Image (cartoon, coloured by chain):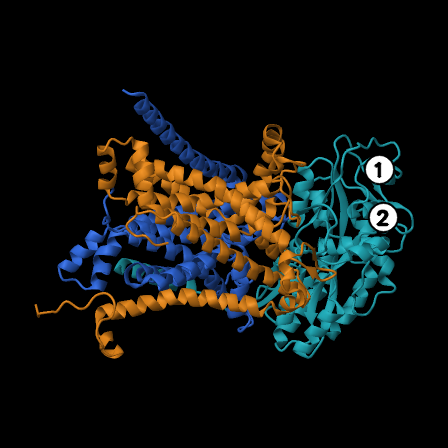
Chain colours: A cyan, B blue, C orange
Amino acid sequence: MKRLASLVFAVLALVAIGVAQGALSINGAGATFPYPMYSKWFDEYHKKNPDLQINYQSIGSGGGIKQVTEGTVDFGASDGPMSDEQLKTFQDKHGFPILHFPTVLGADVPTYNISGVSGELNFTPEAIAAIFLGKVTKWNDPLIAGANKGVNLPGSDIVVVHRSDGSGTTYIWTDYLSKVSDEWKNKVGKGTSVNWPVGLGGKGNEGVAGLIKQTPNAFGYVELIYAIQNKMPYGKVKNSSGAFIKADLAGVTAAAAGTAKNMPDDFRVSITDAPGKTAYPISSFTWLLIPSKFSEGSKRDALKGFLKWALTDGQNETEALSYAKLPKEVVVKETKALNNIQ
Amino acid sequence: MSNRLRWRKFVSHFMLTMTGLCALVAVAVLFFILGYLVYHGGTSVSWNFFTKLPAPVGEVGGGMANAIVGSAKLLLLATLLGVPIGFFGAIYLAEFSGGTVAFVVRYAADLLNGVPSIVIGIFAYSLVVLPFKHFSTLAGGFALGLMMIPITLRSTEEFLRAVPRALREGAMALGASRWKTIASVVVPAAYRGILTAILLAFARVAGETAPLLFTAFGNRFWSPGWDQPTASLPVMIFTYAIAPYDDWHRQAWAAGLVLLGLILIINIVARVILSRGVGVRRT
Amino acid sequence: MATTTVPSAGPFTGSRSFLSRLRDGDEIARLITFIFAGSVVLITLLLVYELWRESYLPRHKFGFGFFVTSVWDPIFDKFGALPFIYGTLVTAGVALLIAVPLGIGAAIFLAELAPARVSDTLQFFIDLLAAVPSVIYGLLGVFVVIPVMRQYIQPALKSSLGFLPFFQGPAYGVGFLTAGIVLAIMVIPYIISVSREVLISVPRDQREAALALGATRWESTWKVVLPFARTGIMGSIFLALARALGETMAVTMVIGNTPTISASLFSPGYSIAAVIANEFTEATGDLYLQSLIELGLVLFLLTFLLNGLARLLIVVTSQRGSEMGQA
């Protein structure tokens, strides 16, 4: 017994020794989509400012909103903007508002696994909505075949795959569908989690990608990065100007630029189905949620410094990781808005 | 030899072979899992893995040192909470209590065991995180400790009960009081089983992710003391596995391998150091 | 050595005051261990209380309808637990159906047949199965079990037993059966580990008596040793059941995450733990969040009922066999 006791004490003592006293530690929580980008940014920034540790964990957009409202983390991150109700909750709880700052852009792409079809298919908004509503059930349905003349589509049943966990990726997808299909808007609606009429649920982008890759005749949506990294075929989507656009970083940035003119001051805007000839219609911002007041001046200054860096130098690192950078107009607007953090 | 006897012998050989097959299946599954982990993650297990902090995507040389230490701290806390409650509670159930109380406690333990790990996390969140307004190693240890209690309790109780009555009666006939009997006769007799129970509970919580998401949270850096968020191996596995990058996938498999390896080592060490050679001999 | 009187062991006799009884080593031990045991009940009650408190919105809105509604719509605020209850029960049932025979069989082999060294070594490895993180089980489910199910096992079952409603419908690879199989692997170490220890501790004379009376090895095991160890084995099954009901991560990766009720085991489904894990972090809006918490409460109720049923079963089929006759 004595041996055991001394063992326990030794271990306790060892692990209680802290490291890096004197470092300022800031915690943030939120969306999983930008996690690779944020982790790279926070690492780079830490190298430039060794006394600052920004610790970001991806527990989901909803989790980020909840935790920053509760005050257990210093900032949040979300793929979908906070609703008026959520803003009010934060305001009521803290006495000051919370601010949105777009950081990078992402896109959802329609991806599929059809034997014999290796090229890019064209999808109209009507086709996508009909497939996800369960009204179009076979690949060679005229609604799909009409846009893909010359492609030999099989007569097999489409296996729809969607996200099972609540996510910003779903938010973007359903937001787009709600805009292009009244039936979807009335029947299903938009949100991080919806009551899907048809389909299997995969957990996370990886889960959906995995399911699609393994299931013949599958069709679903994933973040652009996942399609690229997993080398999955994904199709073109018809945008509001009538052009079929394949998602790429330029098309996504174009979508953001198209809405920049009418961007509200709080940056809470949806850029799905954006105007612009080259705009990719299923794009979205992802936001950092920063409280407008900080009791600790050091934390406020640290975050403001980081944001300034992210909007300038940070933007140069996005494309290497397959994230689209913010358009210039938005960056200018955001830099001005930084002064709102006190 | 009569026909009936021949049949019974055949059944005997057949069924016993079947049990051998069952054991084979169980062990085969384990070796398959180990092999898979080694194949996919083996290359990422390096000295860096054990000593460096996580690196962002695209950079080589990152590791999970903080996650390993974090898991160790969390498991230490969990053991300090879960084992005493489970152990002493089991002693009460097996040695002291009457029928009704024992029934209620067992029932409660089974209920607690069936609670999804994420609900335990939410519970720990509202008890330990919200009042202090920050995530902490303490909260994570608390959540894991809660999960250890039922397994430790129920298993230890079964092993204590399995100690033959004769041993107890013998000790008491020699004049030992109840608690002395328990401490010096019953518990040592059930030692093997109790250790099994504790190690089983330990293994269970070592690999849990969901309760930690809302309590220990996670950390890219070192976590000093006990009241800061901390990284842990299961959460790192989860985070890396759902990311789009192959390099991170390999690290996730490697982390799984390392976690299993550490549990294996702890199993061996515990059995060797804490074994006093006492125990009911295999009969 | 001073003369000592044998202190009164067992239940309290006589009317000594509480404080004077406390000087008695036994009473202290009893008190202390009682506190620990009682704390388990306290924690469980506290948990139920928290769940109850944090789910008042859906309880008032849906009442008992929550149990029988099949819709789960976070946008239009309509929530019902039925598909999740069904999925939880089916997957746990499949898991136990596979794991219990396999587990007890393996435990018998390890306890009765294998030489001590082999048994210890093999047990060592089987214990490791309990240490595999649930996330890894989920990933292995995705990368290994699902393709095997979709390409080999489900078609085979369909062609041989397809007349049964359990094995009909398209084979996606995900679904109740796959989740049940993954769960079975996860709970088997508990059954084997605990059952083996309990079987080992059955006194030698029991076996020898049976053999002396002319029983075969198997008969002695099946008819004498197993019943003697019955409560311990049942205890291990309770552990397994609890684990199967509450498993979160692994199930959500292989069950298909579709709230459906279907007789076919090939159909994708959903379980309570899986939906909570999937949607809790993103749930915004009080009714949504609290509905998820109410699901947690429902699972609690399910576990309560299942445990009660199982214990009833034990009492009803109880014969004299083991010395300790309680469950």
**What's the residue at 80%, 35% (across, down)?**
A119
Q: Which mark is residue B113?
A: none
Residue nearest the observer in this picture, C178 or B224: C178
Q: Secondary structure at mark 2?
A: helix
Of the two numbered discs 2 and 1 on the same chain, state the one appearing first in sequence. 2
**What's the residue at 43%, 39% (across, down)?**
C101
The subunit carrying tag 2 is A
Q: Disc 2 marks which residue? A: A125
Res A188 → quadrant = bottom right
Q: How many marks?
A: 2
| Image quadrant containing the C terminus of chain C | bottom left
Residue B283 visible? The answer is: no
- Residue C102 placement (x, y as % from top left): 44, 38
**Is disc 2 surrounded by few (<14), some (14 to 19) or many (20+) residues within 10 Å?**
some
Residue A301 visible? The answer is: yes
- Residue B79 placement (x, y as % from top left): 40, 59
**What's the residue at 54%, 54% (across, down)?**
B235
The subunit carrying tag 1 is A
| Residue A150 shown left or right of residue B269 in the figure | right
- Residue A171 placement (x, y as % from top left): 74, 56
| Image quadrant containing the N terminus of chain C | bottom left
Q: Amino acid at mark 2?
A: Pro
Q: Disc 1 marks which residue? A: A141
Q: Amino acid at mark 1?
A: Asp
Res B176 → quadrant = bottom left
| Residue A304 shown left or right of residue A3 in the figure | right
**Is disc 1 surrounded by few (<14), some (14 to 19) or many (20+) residues within 10 Å?**
some
